[in-house]
């Protein structure tokens, strides 16, 4: 399995990742770090209470990292949460709708994490 | 030559970003070009900024972070005069944040997700370059000692004032400190710097109440360009600046000199300051007034001096400079015996008539043109010694003047050797006179060069001794063969017994140094007798002869030869 195959499998933007990190070796190095970054766990924890500050900070952190990795679909979905909880702007979605968005993000993240694990195994 | 770019160190970049993956990606982009350090939030970032403030070239700062966000970091940097100089690029994905960050002092931003690596590198490089250029300009703009403008920037700003504010009537002021080198020499460089800073503070205080700019042009010279005021106001400005220096030390008498060129339409700042400097130089030697306003007399003097400078080259070609000779007699011999003579220059200008050496020698000494005159005089004097030797069989040593600038000229020794060789003379026949005041600056270097000349066999006469400020300690290490006592001691000899005591003192110093003394300016028999009784060796002055043109001096030699023959 190549890095490009992996990006196709997880709805990532391989071209964007290459633009920033140049080499597959580098892209895979940082992708592997994503699994242990704690980003999704922080977002899930914030989702339990829907504390707006925690929601904004954890979504914002995840948005930045996933965007830099070229995980555009995931990043776009998290970005919607960032805007929802940005200080000073009014909420557009109900709590239930936010929870549904969170589930969607977790599912996509899981798909990404699974793809990364599969890729990891393929190169061992 | 080493290019300035080659002197550059590898720049240190601080990345403040809470997300490890983002930090790593940035690190990967930058690591080939820069040294990197990392902080995971603003608080740690601030600690690292303070620790590395002198080495940091740039900070890449995330805005949304735990503990302390990027906005707070920007605020803290902005409030710190030292740290605010370090440029910051913010890492952000939001337009609103970009604006806020720029308003807080950020230099630029890098968007998230990151652009192509070349874009990131180019931004970082550009901001570092801009910041370094700004710092370079700032350090070139201000004199580090006083904080006033440096010369180049001062004149640039003065020109801009004239160009953009033609209705402002600006005066030019030049200030310097009398014998500042002595202040440095006797009270130490540190005290000298303190004096300069104090004077600069006084100037800044004066400029608080008026429109103007100021610069330390060089060493102890300060220039001020300010709105026109009356001469009585300038008297007050002078008194106020002088009183600041008086407060500094009761023991050291530090006096400033001030020259003012009042506003006149159509005169450039550079010309105005030339004239203010002329006014300031007029204070030199005058004990009465230490503040002078440039006036019509000075303008005439300036034009006259300009004419002399313009005419110099042509005057030498045209042989307008004439060398006169004044004898020096050994007064301990009976009758007094001609021993040597001093070569003195006169300028017979075809239009201006006879120009006094007092008018052109100090002028040419100040602007470095004196060597043209001196080289001519040395050549004429050397030829003259040879001519009298060959024609009359009489070998009369002549002394010539050597200015400070010539002493430091590396071509001096070969030139003198060439002159001696051309005329088949030895170093004993051409003596060199160096004025005492020449020894005040760079004394050790000058002493070394004069020591070399003595090793070649030249005799060195210290001219105008007693008019300068030689310390007794220094005198003992000065390489001299003869002391020429300043003529003011002789001039006052008969008026006051104290003056005679001074002469005795100088003769004692010479005895201690084991060198003979020449008394200059001796005009009467009484003076001559007093000096003879006091065991002064040699006398030069109108009593024996005024300076004579060569043909008249030749007659004097012949007379002297006849006296010799009859004895």
Image (cartoon, coloured by chain):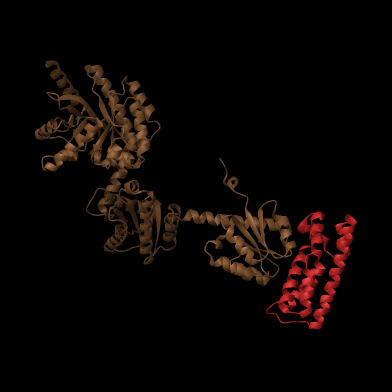
Residue drawn at x 25%, y 51% as measured from the top left? B297
Q: Is residue B168 above or below residue B518?
A: below
Q: In the displayed structure, does residue A22 sit left or right of residue B325?
A: right
Residue B507 lies, in percent from the top left, at: 19, 34
Q: Colour of chain A?
A: red
Work out whether residue B271 can be spotted: no
Asked if B387 appears above or below B464 in the picture, the reply is above
**B512 or B4: which is nearer to us?**
B512
> What is the tally of numbered marks visible in this picture?
0
| Picture colour for chain B | brown
> x, y (%) of residue B301?
27, 47
Question: Which residue shows up at 73% across the image and 75% down it?
Answer: A56
Q: Residue B353: x percent and y percent? A: 23, 38
Residue B229: quarter of image: bottom left
* Residue at 32% in and 60% down: B244
Report which quarter residue B117 is drawn in: bottom right
Left or right: B562, with B55 as reference point = left
């Amino acid at each position: 399995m190549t890095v490009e195959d992996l990006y196709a499998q997880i709805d990532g933007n391989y071209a964007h990742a290459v633009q920033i990190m140049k080499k597959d070796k580098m892209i895979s190095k940082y992708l592997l770090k994503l699994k242990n970054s704690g980003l999704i766990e922080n977002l899930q924890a914030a989702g339990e209470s829907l504390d707006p500050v925690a929601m904004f900070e954890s979504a914002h952190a995840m948005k930045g990292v996933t965007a830099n990795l070229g995980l555009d679909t995931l990043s776009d979905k998290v970005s919607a949460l960032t805007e929802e909880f940005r200080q000073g702007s009014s909420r557009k979605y109900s709590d239930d709708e936010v929870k549904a968005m969170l589930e969607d993000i977790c599912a996509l993240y899981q798909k990404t994490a699974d793809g990364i694990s599969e890729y990891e195994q393929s190169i061992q | 030559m080493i290019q300035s770019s080659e002197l550059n160190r590898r720049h240190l970049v601080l990345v403040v970003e809470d997300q490890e993956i983002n930090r790593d990606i940035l690190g990967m982009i930058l690591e080939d070009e820069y040294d990197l350090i990392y902080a995971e939030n603003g608080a740690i970032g601030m600690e690292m900024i303070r620790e590395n403030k002198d080495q940091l070239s740039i900070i890449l700062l995330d805005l949304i972070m735990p503990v302390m966000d990027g906005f707070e970091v920007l605020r803290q940097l902005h409030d710190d005069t030292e740290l605010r100089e370090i440029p910051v690029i913010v890492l952000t994905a939001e337009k609103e944040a970009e604006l806020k960050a720029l308003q807080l002092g950020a230099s630029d931003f890098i968007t998230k997700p990151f652009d192509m690596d070349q874009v990131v590198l180019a931004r970082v490089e550009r901001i570092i370059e801009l910041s370094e250029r700004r710092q370079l300009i700032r350090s070139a703009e201000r004199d580090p000692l006083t904080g006033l403008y440096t010369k180049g920037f001062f004149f640039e700003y003065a020109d801009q004032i004239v160009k953009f504010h033609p209705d402002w009537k600006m005066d030019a002021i030049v200030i310097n400190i009398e014998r500042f080198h002595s202040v440095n020499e006797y009270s130490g460089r540190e005290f000298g710097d303190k004096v300069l800073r104090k004077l600069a503070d006084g100037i800044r205080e004066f400029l608080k109440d008026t429109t103007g700019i100021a610069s330390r042009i060089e060493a102890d010279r300060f220039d001020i360009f300010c709105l026109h005021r009356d001469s009585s106001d300038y008297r007050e400005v002078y008194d106020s600046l002088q009183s600041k220096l008086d407060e500094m030390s009761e023991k050291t008498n530090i006096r400033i000199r001030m020259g003012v060129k009042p506003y006149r339409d159509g005169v450039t700042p550079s010309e105005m300051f030339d004239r203010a400097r002329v006014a300031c130089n007029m204070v030199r030697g005058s004990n009465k007034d230490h503040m002078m306003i440039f006036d019509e007399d000075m303008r005439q003097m300036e034009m006259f001096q300009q004419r002399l400078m313009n005419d110099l080259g042509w005057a030498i070609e045209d042989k307008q400079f004439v060398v006169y000779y004044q004898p020096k007699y050994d007064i301990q011999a009976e009758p007094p015996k001609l021993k040597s003579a001093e070569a003195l220059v006169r300028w017979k200008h075809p239009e201006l008539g006879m120009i006094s050496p007092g008018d052109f020698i100090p002028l040419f000494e100040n602007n470095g043109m004196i060597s043209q005159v001196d080289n001519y005089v040395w050549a004429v004097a050397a030829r003259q010694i040879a001519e009298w030797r060959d024609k009359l069989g009489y070998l009369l040593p002549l002394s010539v003047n050597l200015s400070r600038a010539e002493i430091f000229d590396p071509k001096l020794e070969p030139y003198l050797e060439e002159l001696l060789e051309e005329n088949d003379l030895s170093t004993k026949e051409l003596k060199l006179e160096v004025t005492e005041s020449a020894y005040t600056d760079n004394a050790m270097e000058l002493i070394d060069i004069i020591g070399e000349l003595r090793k070649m066999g030249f005799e060195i006469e210290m001219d105008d001794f007693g008019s300068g400020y030689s310390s007794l300690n220094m005198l003992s290490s000065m390489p001299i063969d003869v002391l020429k006592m300043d003529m003011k001691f002789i001039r006052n000899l008969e008026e006051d017994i104290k003056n005679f005591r001074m002469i005795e003192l100088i003769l004692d110093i010479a005895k201690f140094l084991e060198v003979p003394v020449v008394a200059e300016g001796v005009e009467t028999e009484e003076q001559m007798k007093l000096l003879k009784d006091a065991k002064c060796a040699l006398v030069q002055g109108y009593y024996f002869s005024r300076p004579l043109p060569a043909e008249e001096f030749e007659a004097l030699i012949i007379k002297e030869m006849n006296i010799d023959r009859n004895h």
